[in-house]
Amino acid sequence: MLFSILFRKYPLFRTAIYAVLVVVSVFLISFFTTKTRKIPVIHALNPAIGVGGDTVSILGENFGQERGTSFVEIGTNRITASGYVFWSDSEIKIVLPQNVQDGFLSVSTQSGKSVPLFFANAAGIPVPSKSVSRAVLPALFAVSPTSAAVGSVVVLSGERFGSVRGNSLVVFREDGTENECFALESESDYESWSDGEIRVRVPDGANSGTVFVRTESGESIAQKFSVLHPYGKKTFLSSQTYSIQLEENIEEISASSGNITLRVPRPDISSSQPAVLLNESTPEPIIADFKNTIVYTVSLSGKSGKKVDFLQNFVVTRREVKTEIEKQKVRAFSAKEKARPLYKKYTSPDALVLSDNTAIVSLSQEITSTTKNPYEQARLLYEYMISSFSILTSPKSTGESALELLSKKSGDAYDFAVIYASLLRAAGIPSVPVSGILIDSSLKAQNHWWTEFYLEGIGWIPADPALGASLPYTPFREIENARTFYFGNLDAQHISFGRGFSSMKSSMPEGKIVRRPRSFSFQSIWEEAEGNVNYSSLWSDPVVLGVY
């Protein structure tokens, strides 16, 4: 009764009541809208690999019937308004921008951001050759000069090479064998590439025989080519083929939503490790070969309390390396050679090789001051390493800096490889630490690290200062003097998973990143997770299943 009188008699009272009702209504609407809003969910990308200009369908739910202020991101790049072809609650179609990079794709609406899925730029992924008519096969007419040393530039003239290189290769095949060496982009071997002319450097490991061009259309007819050896030669002797297994396990999962991505290292391809075949991968990877890793992305939603297993089997062929150097003929690097991208890359410090460290620079100068011959400098540094430091019998489990070797005077094979490469670079000698495994005569594998240094006219020369310093190890055949053998030579029981540090860009800027220091690959990211995810991971070291 009193409320009715007040409501009718006093206008200010009525206004106050209306205001309270409006506030309560807005609150209730906001509350129930928040409770019932639906976060966008991506089920699949079709395709999950593409290049700029391609159309990609994003399949899922809760996208909204219209785009409005919603958007799609790949990595940290947002798709602009002109890039949307179609938008519905269950499907979005976008046109990839020309500068698209690999990364995680997500959909954001007013209700929130989806758990992302991995997308890859196809330009960086090897593709198999296609069978096509011989009318479009590359044609190689001439090679000039017809003889040159490793590292020298030769010009290949012809037609139908393709206006850009893509995944095409220049291949050098040794006489009387099936041994092939490829010119590699990673070594800056390609000076230029056009449809009618290729300027390429004679690659590491090449020997006299033939040269030809291999494109997606097929192979050109080979031309004769002789590799000169001005002061030494690297040859490949016996080879071994191994079956190698990797395994990773994700367990103790507690996740309401979220993804985990694994980047599993692959054995790399080089002149001394010419064949790598992935013959089993469980589950099916998103990408089988992306920057020398196998990429898996798995949603952990609904997997709480479960275990997710990953398995890879490789068949790897490794060659024994032997070098014969006439050291008195080796000369210092010329100004022209120092201008090469290869020289600049492998004499500069990075996150792994600490060649600008004051102690490293001082020590390198002290050891090499008696000679300007780079081969003799490399030998002096190697001798210093195995004479001045003691080798630990097993790898360290900690991630301490390799620089600790200088003060502690003892370290593992990782320390020896990294510090030796650092001393070499400080002396102006291109070098790279190599990560992988060492297989003994009982087929037991252990994580291992060694080094390679580069000489013009010869290529990459191996050195294993840890084995030279008497690291316990039983090779397939007896090595008479390990100290001298492992400078310039390498048996076929070293399997490489990486040359130098592989710096990977995170695809989850706000996600969890896992690194594995002192492991069988020098890579910055091994796994990433995003979302409400808790789990534990176990990465087993490589296991040798057999040798052939």
Image (tube, helix red, strand yellow):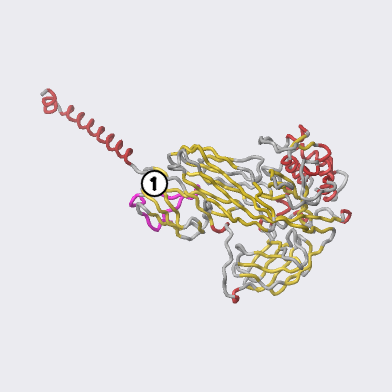
Residue at 65%, 65% (x, y): give it: 193
Figure check: 355 above or below 131: above
Left or right, residue 125 beside residue 356: left
Magenta includes 73?
yes
Left or right, residue 435 beside residue 33: right
Query: Nearest the camera: 445 or 333?
Result: 445
Query: Nearest the camera: 268 or 505?
Result: 268
Residue at 65%, 42% (x, y): give it: 519
Give the image location of residue 513, x and y in percent.
55, 40
Q: Which residues are magenta?
A: 64-87
Figure check: 421 above or below 219: above
Give the amino acid type for the residue marked by disc 1 in the picture.
Pro
| Residue denoted by label 1 | 40
Can the viewer see residue 79 in this picture? yes
Q: Residue furthest bottom?
A: 135
Give the image location of residue 273, x and y in percent.
70, 56
Dot 1 falls on a residue whose secondary structure is: loop
Q: Say which quadrant the N terminus sits in.
A: top left
Q: Say which quadrant the C terminus sits in.
A: bottom right
Residue at 66%, 45% (x, y): give it: 520
Q: For residue 174, what is the image quadrant?
A: bottom right
Magenta includes 364?
no
